[in-house]
Structures are given as C-alpha cells and as structure tokens.
Image (cartoon, rainbow, N blue to C red):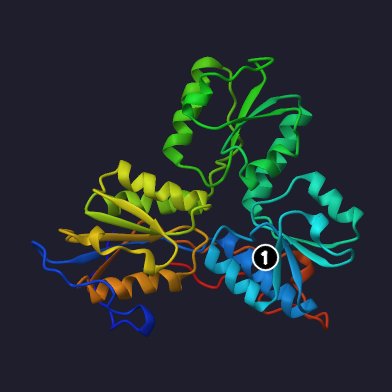
Amino acid sequence: MSSPAVHLPVPRIPGRRGRLQDIPVNGQKKVLLAAPRGYCAGVDRAVIAVEKALERYGAPVYVRKQIVHNIHVVTELEKKGAIFVEEVDEVPSGAHVVFSAHGVSPAVVSAASDRGLQAIDATCPLVTKVHREAVRFARDDFEILLIGHEGHEEVEGTAGEAPEHVTVVNSPDHADTIEVRDPSKVVWLSQTTLSVDETMETVRRLRERFPELQDPPSDDICYATQNRQVAIKKVAVGADLVIVVGSANSSNSVRLVEVALEHGAKAAYRVDYVDEVKQEWLEGVQTVGVTSGASVPEVLVTEVLEELAGAGYRDVEEVRTAEEDLIFSLPKELRQDAAGKRDSRALGGRGRA
C-alpha cells in the first residue's frame, strides 16, 4: 500500500537547513517513507513512565541503564531531571528508580529492594511475556536456547530468570555448535528486537540438530520490530539509498539497516541525527528510503525529511504495510495522580507513524 506523494513544507530548523545540496540526478527525486516506523507501544510507555515519575515525585528520578536505546530520548529526559545509572547500587537509598523497557533480572529487583529503593518497572510487557516463558519452561526442566545478542540488557534480564536453564545463541553459525543435556527437552525463546529472517534461520539450524526443539507459545519478536522490518523490505526494493534513524545500541535500528541491504537497497546507513547524513550518500541517488527504529521520536525523522527536501527530495510517498493501535498501561505506581485520581495518561499513546 502507498499513499499519494505529498510536498513537504520548507525546513523549519534554521541550524540544520540547507546543509545538503540539491544536485541534479537522472529522474525525479523522491522519498519513500516507511510506515510503521518510530515509537512502539512499549517505548512510549517507558518514556512516559519516566516523565510521569518526574512530575509525580520531582527530580531526580533515577533510571537503571538507558530507558530506551536512543541517545536523543535519554538526553531530553536528563534535561528534565532523570539520572541514568548502570546499576542500582549507584542510586541513593530510598530514592525512586525506573527499570528500563528492556527488563531486568530477579537479582536486580532484589538488589533494589535491599537498598530500599522505590522501584518502578517500565519493562515492555512483551519482554515480560518472554520472562514468564523462561520461568515456565525452567520450572518444567527444559533447556532454554535464548536466541539473542550476548550482553544485551534484554538478554541479560531474560537469562537471569533461569540462569541454570538458559543458553544464549548469538547467531545461526553459533547454533551449529550448541550442546544440550537432553535433546528431547529443549525450547527456543528470543530477544524481541531481532531480525525475523535471521532468527528463523537460527531456529532452522537448531532444529536440524535437535528435531524435538519446541517453539515458544507465541512469537517472541515483537509486533513493532516485525512491522518495521516488513515496511523497510518493501521500501528497499525501490530505494537507491535507505536512511535509518536510530542509535547504534538499538538492536532493532541496526537490524533495519541490515534488512534494507538484504532486500534491495543499494546503500543503507544509520544516523542518530540529521547532521550525520552525508552529501556523498546522495550522489546519483534518485530515491531515498527513510525509516526509524522503535525507540525513535518522530521529530528526528521530520528533521531528516526537511533536510532532504532542501536537497531536492520534496516528493514523499508513504509506504504503509500495517496499522498499529496497541497501547500499554503505565506501571501501576503511575496510573494515579498525587491526589489519587486516575491520571489522564494512565495509558500511553503519544502517537506513532
């Protein structure tokens, strides 16, 4: 599905206007704008949770790790009074601490409790689902092959639910070397932000070795990650260049670059900000695809579109492959205001593309 081309207004950010030159190319310049893109429901919930905690309790509010993997979001929340720490032992006793959207292990929850911290759990409900699956399968004495990136916060949190039962599988090639205790009692789970295609290849290779490998009760890769990958696949086929807005530590943003290259884009790059888009990327480029990771506010995409408009890419065609209307309730501590009334933002829903 695609909508008619629209003409963007002139750029509105003086400091970033006109840096890219409008150099003629063969054919008409245009942008293919992927949709869905940007904030997912879990990110929206987590960011609003920090904002509401600051409103409710006052600054500072501490956040373990980055609330979501986006440098702009973190910087803006720091301006409002959020303090980001690596571990809960850096938080003063009795203070409020928010757990990030990526989730934490039971050991972190226990450490926060031991310090008397007022914990607010902003874990994405879809990550929580994977945690519960890990607990359930460990209780039934299954060996859990957790497909994901070693060291990623989400993987650490999920593995921490049942460390004696979990083995992390980093890639399809890694699947070829995995050993298990009992091939008849093995199940796979996954990090929610992976490439769907690569994950399924890892599962295929695991199943070749362990034919009785069980699947999770439902997809672990989140709807938003899948939707953004489907959209960029459709965009990439017709794009000379794809620009993905997202941070380097955002797994789903990095995957979007890879997916774009795998599905026809001649070049693809990830940027945090419009200033990182390089003139040489546009040489000979007729069609630019644009998307953003699930932790990226739309304003950053708008800035890229405005700069591209100044370089002659004024016609923007949205390529929409799905509609998203999922909204998650805020953590229970934040659903009421200071007077005990239900807060108007008890649900997220700031709006997504």
Query: In the visual, does 245 lie left or right of 118?
Result: left
Please, is residue 209 above or below residue 168 in the view?
above
Q: Going by the image, does 108 lie left or right of 242?
A: right
What residue is rendered at 54% in x and 49% in y? 222
Q: Position of residue 242 (x, y in %)?
A: 30, 56
**Crowding at mark 1 (Cα within 10 Å: few <14, some 14-19, many 20+):** some
When asked about the image quadrant of residue 112, the answer is bottom right
**In the rendered image, the vertical position of residue 175 relative to residue 155, given as above or below:** above
Instruction: Tell me the quarter of the picture where residue 49 sits.
Output: bottom right
Quadrant assignment for the N terminus: bottom left
- The reply to whether residue 14 is in sight is yes
Q: Which residue is mark 1?
A: 329
Could you say where residue 38 lies in the image, as x and y percent from the top left? 46, 63
Which amino acid type is marked by label 1?
Answer: Ser
Q: Secondary structure at mark 1?
A: loop
Whole-percent x, y for residue 94 in the image: 89, 66
Name the spot of residue 141 as percent of width and height, x first. 76, 24
Is 240 drawn above or below residue 27 in the view shown?
above
Of residue 104 and residue 60, the one placed in the foreground of this image is 60
Q: Residue at x 80, y 56 (%)?
A: 88
Q: Is residue 333 left or right of residue 254?
A: right
Q: Is residue 234 above or below residue 174?
A: below
Q: Which residue corresponds to the image point at 65% horizontal and 17% vertical from the top-left?
A: 180
Residue 13 in view here: no
Which quadrant of the view contains residue 32? bottom left
**Quadrant including the C terminus:** bottom left
Q: How many numbered discs? A: 1
